[in-house]
Amino acid sequence: MKSLQINTFKEYKEKYEQSVSDPEGFWSEVAEHFQWKKKWDKVLEWDFSKPEIKWFIGAKLNITENCLDRHLETIGNKTAIIWEPNDPDEESRYITYRQLYVKVSRFANVLKNNGIKKGDRVCLYMPMIPELAIAMLACARIGAVHSIVFAGFSSSALSSRINDSQCKMLITANEVYRGTKPINLKKVCDQALENTPSVETVIVYRRTVEPTEMTPGRDKFWFDELQKVDTPCEAEAMDAEDLLFILYTSGSTGKPKGMVHTTGGYMVGSTYTFENVFQCKKDDIYWCTADIGWITGHSYIIYGPLCAGATTVMFEGVPSYPDYGRFWEIVDKLNVTHFYTAPTAIRALAKHPLSLVEKHDLSSLKVLGSVGEPINEEAWHWYNDNIGKSNCPIVDTWWQTETGAMMISPIAGITPTRPTFATLPLPGVQPVLMDERGNEVVQKSMEASEGRLAMKAPWPSIARTIYGDHQRYKDTYFSAYKNMYFTGDGAYRDASGNYRITGRVDDVVIVSGHNLGTAPIENAIDEHADIVECAVVGFPHDVKGNALYAFVTKYDDCKTSDEDLKIEINKLIASTIGAIAKLDKVQFVSGLPKTRSGKIMRRILRKIASNEADNLGDISTLLNPDIVEEIKAGAL
Ligand code: PRX
């Protein structure tokens, strides 16, 4: 593929201007870089009031021909995937584009042989092994819709997702090790399958030699099924708007939302942003540490990098095993050039001695990335100083499951960066800030502004609906502001137009009539040398309306007393934000409740702070449900 990369900041500005004044012309030029079975009749039709969004109307393609087939002649022998196992003594796997093409085609025939057809939904509940990539691409090859469920979710979370989209098949592995902990995925599946009548077949990849209980007629081993089929598998001609995948994301209320992504626009959006934001060159080694069970893994471990012909690393394990230097050991071993992770991982690693970083050679690194939540100053500097050695641009990429691809982010080495700022919108992205009354906050020159972040126009990889619930899609994203997509986030924009995401607007607390975002208060607390991490929530207060409650974790070797620490934290807040943001309550805890993707579950903390701990709702999908009891017991 000819390069899609922007080379200078001037070029970025020109492309951006073009993408706003002539979106159809801009995106059709980008789309020319891909392989289509039939080109589009029209680039875009949209109406946010319905909402209905269609890109590359009338076009036919298969995304796997773009990820695989078209690379065979040029880079067939290049490594597509490097797989790094949980156990450092087990061998890494290197899979070339040609090998991946063969594996995907063959497994696609396994799907067909088991009755899967275009449009059928297939659920994947798998560990981070190459077979997960193979299975998802095999689905795409024959036009089946994959629904990947993160393999840390409980059986009930799995069954509700399977039922929501009526999956016909489930693909899993028998068992996997994460750190020292064996996880029997097949057992979780068996429990989930007790009430998922739509599933006819289960394909089981044997990751370990442990005996595996199989239900005759339903369960089949991956390897056995491969023996029954040939390799070639023609790629199904998909309409650009045919479903590529469903991915569930949690809403602020109610059941998870099955976000629907379609084929053409998603391919163009994920690849264009991958190419530009990371600026990978021919021999670079790119590693995104996310799990493929999240959108980051879909777009930036698999589809974006493979369409772009990059070498992408998949890591099966955890950052703490065999020790907290594992990430850096892998960077050193594989000569990773591009490293993309989440602030929560950075903060966790920063807690441990620097010697764990320093004993590894990180000189191969060129670009660092951050995603998933606002990165606070302290974490940004730790990452920049100790990992990037002040030599690697940090791309703080803001986007969402719903957006499918990065939206606001620096282009590595090209956009000037600023700690904690996601900086500027990528071409094709038209952000606006909205005020409390629903009016656009107009950017006046040399003036900063703040508001709720919305989008004025569609971009190719926007989710098209919530599976089976278009009304909820409309209510959630298109009802807050007329003719706009509402992100649910708040943002600050500096005088030069750089955006800093301040956090979910549902985390705003009104204290004595003042609108306070909790993220900047948390940033201020995190600045304290004794503090690892914190979460601030509001709770009802007789006089102020709401007051602030902080849940704080401190370093093990902290010598300051809790009382003194509280005073020092409040001083820090007063000096960075103002006395209005002073905390009424500070509870020191040994950990914060987190989702599997590392997000702090503020919903739970809000309830505890508001004395409603009896009514916490479902906490089974938390990474660390045990912490909740400890926090409840110590609540102030
Ligand atoms: O609040 C924003 C935050 O994560 C939300 C989207 O979460 P999810 O759909 O799970 O996707 C995460 C991976 C793309 C956003 O609404 N968020 C994501 N990236 C950033 C961020 N907040 C601040 N800075 C970011 N770079």
Image: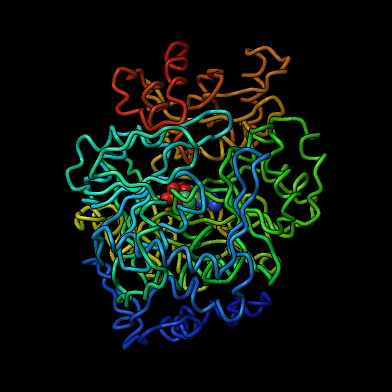
Residue 303 placement (x, y as % from top left): 48, 64
Instruction: Please identify the residue farthest to the front as the structure is shown.
Output: 227
Residue 149 placement (x, y as % from top left): 37, 46
State the residue at coordinates (29%, 63%): 112
Q: Is residue 253 left or right of residue 445?
A: left
State the residue at coordinates (20%, 41%): 196
Residue 277 placement (x, y as % from top left): 60, 65
Q: Quadrant of the N terminus?
A: bottom right
Residue 511 seen in the figure: no
Please tell me whether residue 111 is drawn above or below residue 456 in the rendered image: above
Q: Is residue 65 left or right of residue 313?
A: left
Residue 618 seen in the figure: yes
State the residue at coordinates (29%, 52%): 258
Residue 541 placement (x, y as % from top left): 39, 22
Instruction: Please identify the residue farthest to the left as the structure is shown.
Output: 197
> Quadrant of the rendered structure where residue 345 is?
top right
Q: Is residue 582 left or right of residue 476?
A: right
Please tell me whether residue 563 is drawn above or below residue 622 in the rendered image: above
- In front of the other: 157 or 233: 233
Please tell me whether residue 331 is drawn above or below residue 98 in the rendered image: above
Q: Describe the colour scheme in one phrase.
A: rainbow
Q: How many marks?
A: 0
